[in-house]
Image: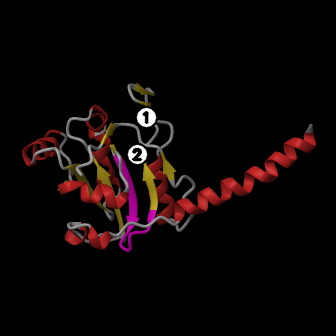
Amino acid sequence: MKFYFLLWCLFLFPLVTVQAQDGQNKKVAVENIPFFNAEKSASGLYVLMFLGTDCPISQKYGNTLRELPETYSDITFYGIVPHHFSEKEMIQYKKEYNLPFSMYRDEHNKVAKICKATITPEVFLIDGDGNVYYDGAIDNWFYALGKSRFQPTQFYLKEAIEEVQNLQPVSVPHADAVGCMIEMKH
């Protein structure tokens, strides 16, 4: 029995290793993101946050979204709102949750398509060349639609930021986001 377990581990380990490495090689075409160079990042890192103004999960993250740019003031944060929300809804959302970062309406979901974002909220930690260090959920507070923990126990985005800033490989390069689907415009 131990032999089969060892054999199983030997075959599984290379698959896990390849997945982790693949997660580190993602890239987005930042030159095709209209607002990307609007604000320079002191650290060279950017966080793209896809947010739905009417998405209950995006709304519940109000405090976290306000605190992240304060904690990581050397990183530029961008809020990206899908095309089907009006400018007025976006401004109201920013005001209601007192969000300290620029927000942009994603016409024709161009940026969502570039990043392959499908959920709000969904975040991408990237550098100025478009290398993706982390993408997915902010943390593990929500683990399914309508299901959440009392408080998060894993802080994926924060951990990824700190690992990149400390020149360490990102231990969790992706975690599935839970939230509202981005309605793609064709």
Location of residue 161 with respect to 8 vertically, above or below: below
What span is in magenta? 122-132
Distance, label 2 to label 1, CA atoms, is 8 Å
Label 2 neighbour load within 10 Å: few <14, some 14-19, many 20+: many
Residue 159 shown left or right of residue 44 in the figure: right
Mark 1 falls on what kind of element?
loop
Mark 2 falls on what kind of element?
loop
- On whether residue 128 falls in the magenta region, the answer is yes
Whether label 2 touches label 1, CB < 8 Å: yes
Nearer to the camera, 37 or 5: 5
Determine the residue located farthest toward the front in the rendered image: 186
Residue 107 x/y as whole percent:
17, 56
Location of mark 2 (residue): 138
Nearer to the camera, 150 or 90: 90
Question: Residue type at mark 2?
Answer: Ile
Q: In the figure, residue 35 lies in which quadrant?
A: bottom left
The answer to whether any part of residue 37 appears in the image is yes
Question: Residue type at mark 1?
Answer: Trp
- On whether residue 124 falls in the magenta region, the answer is yes
Residue 124 x/y as whole percent:
38, 56
Residue 123 x/y as whole percent:
37, 51
Location of mark 1 (residue): 141
Taken as a whole, is the magenta stretch helix, strand or loop?
strand
**Residue at the image position 88 percent from the left and 42 percent from the top:** 4
**Residue at the image position 29 percent from the left and 44 percent from the top:** 182
**Residue at the image position 53 percent from the left and 59 percent from the top:** 23
**Residue at the image position 25 percent from the left and 68 percent from the top:** 36
Q: In the figure, residue 151 lies in which quadrant?
A: top left
Res. 96 mark? none
